[in-house]
Amino acid sequence: MAKKPKGSWKALGSRNRQVCSAHPERLYMYDNSTHQGLEKKITKRALDIQPFIVMDVMEKALELQKQGHHVVHLEIGEPDLPTPQCICKSGCLAMEKGYTHYTHSLGILELRQAICNHYQEKYGVEVTPDQVLVTSGTSPALLLIFSALLETGDQIIMSDPHYPCYPNYVNFLGAEPVFIKVYEEEGFQLDPDEIRRHLSPKVKAILINSPSNPTGTLLSPEKMKAIARLGVPVISDEIYHGLVYGEKEHSILEFTKDAFVLNGFSKLYAMTGWRLGYVIAPHAFVRPLQKMQQNFIISASSISQWAAITALKEAHEDVRRMWNTYNERRKYMVSRLKDLGFGLATEPQGAFYVFANAKHLSSKSYELAFEILEKAHVGVAPGIDFGENGEGYLRFSYANSLENIREGLDRIENYLRQR
Ligand SMILES: Cc1ncc(COP(=O)(O)O)c(C=O)c1O
């Protein structure tokens, strides 16, 4: 069993979990079975991995559904829309043609070239196919980049709130996440001066995610430029690029070449199940990243790679259609949440999330999310899942039909009236 960090701990939710008052963002599993027998041999590294709290909500929602209740899912961070037809057809064609084997470990050259063309056309930046590594989703790309950049004891700066998996990768590698709090009143913008105050020789990278999960915030180009000038490599998770509804998004490569871009097909092309992402890295890092890929993963799925070429070259109309759909839902959700009394100091400009202030209802987002689920039968993600500074917020996903969103928010309205 992993050694329990110091602090005062209390049970949380219905599962075998505890939360520390000093670190409410850190959950601790206390599954008794891990005290006995073979389980004792499980590494601390494996045991220390924190669960996704939103999965608790989903699992509870499924339980309710099994009991015959209808639940509206606003907790899920996955497109509800189908993968566009042209992409699916291209995947089928790849199978028919027998493109069903390993590929070059960096990825199919045509795809890497298409990624370079995309970055050239959209951001005006020059990248070459030998800087691109295609991976089985953005998630393994994160692991490869962190492994190439962080030694044990090193630090990496990221915002709080943040995508919940980020610190888990870092801790897994024996490195340390350093959290910079971002605030609703400031549009959840990372402050370069605040980052500067946290810099030390131990800090090996700064991680940014714009538009962000969970806040939907878009970093201003001025802030990105200032972060790029801090003299520390920047890892930019650009997975929600294309899903922006106001100002244009920027790639970190517009501001510095000392950067790692992470991107993928899961969100913009509704391809979560195809498991495809990529890294654009400075030349010096490509060979080490490639060697890790060769050993640990071999190559990304060939079929998905052929389909992704079609996504980049032919799916513009489909992307436009999905964008319109999300934008319509976003506007509806924002206005309804405001009417329901949730705090939204700045409107989300990207991704498919609204991170709403629910502190007037409860300071404990985990309990509140479960209360809403059990009483109103609507799943929402508790802010605490995204870091200590996310406490008191709820993340509402609009990756669901307008009809379902309307129904979910109606239920919440009724529930709040009675509460
Ligand atoms: C910010 C962010 N980065 C990365 C990922 C992982 O995406 P993928 O499906 O490409 O592994 C997600 C998924 O939710 C995400 O929200």
Image (cartoon, rainbow, N blue to C red):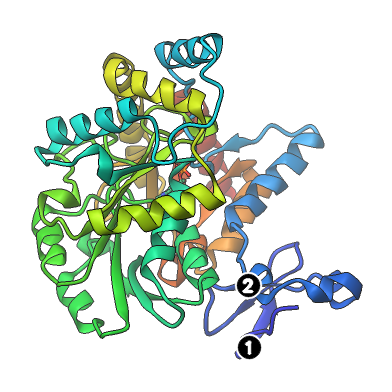
Q: Is residue 342 visible?
A: no
Answer above or below: position of 322 versus 405: above
Q: Position of residue 412 (x, y in %)?
A: 53, 43
Residue at 51%, 19% in the rendered image: 99
Determine which residue is flagged by label 2: 45
Residue 143, given in percent of the width and then of the height, sits at 47, 58
The image shows residue 265 at horizontal and vertical percentages of: 40, 33
72 with respect to 230 (left or right) = right
State whether residue 175 appears in this view: yes
Above or below — where is 127 with respect to 49?
A: above
The kind of residue on which mark 1 rests is Ser
Q: Quadrant of residue 117?
A: top left
Q: Are marks 2 and 1 in contact (CB under 8 Å)?
A: no
Q: Residue at x 13, y 30 (%)?
A: 121
Of the 4 image quadrants, the one containing the C terminus is: bottom right
Among the 4 quarters of the image, the one containing residue 8: bottom right
| Rendered-image quadrant of the N terminus | bottom right
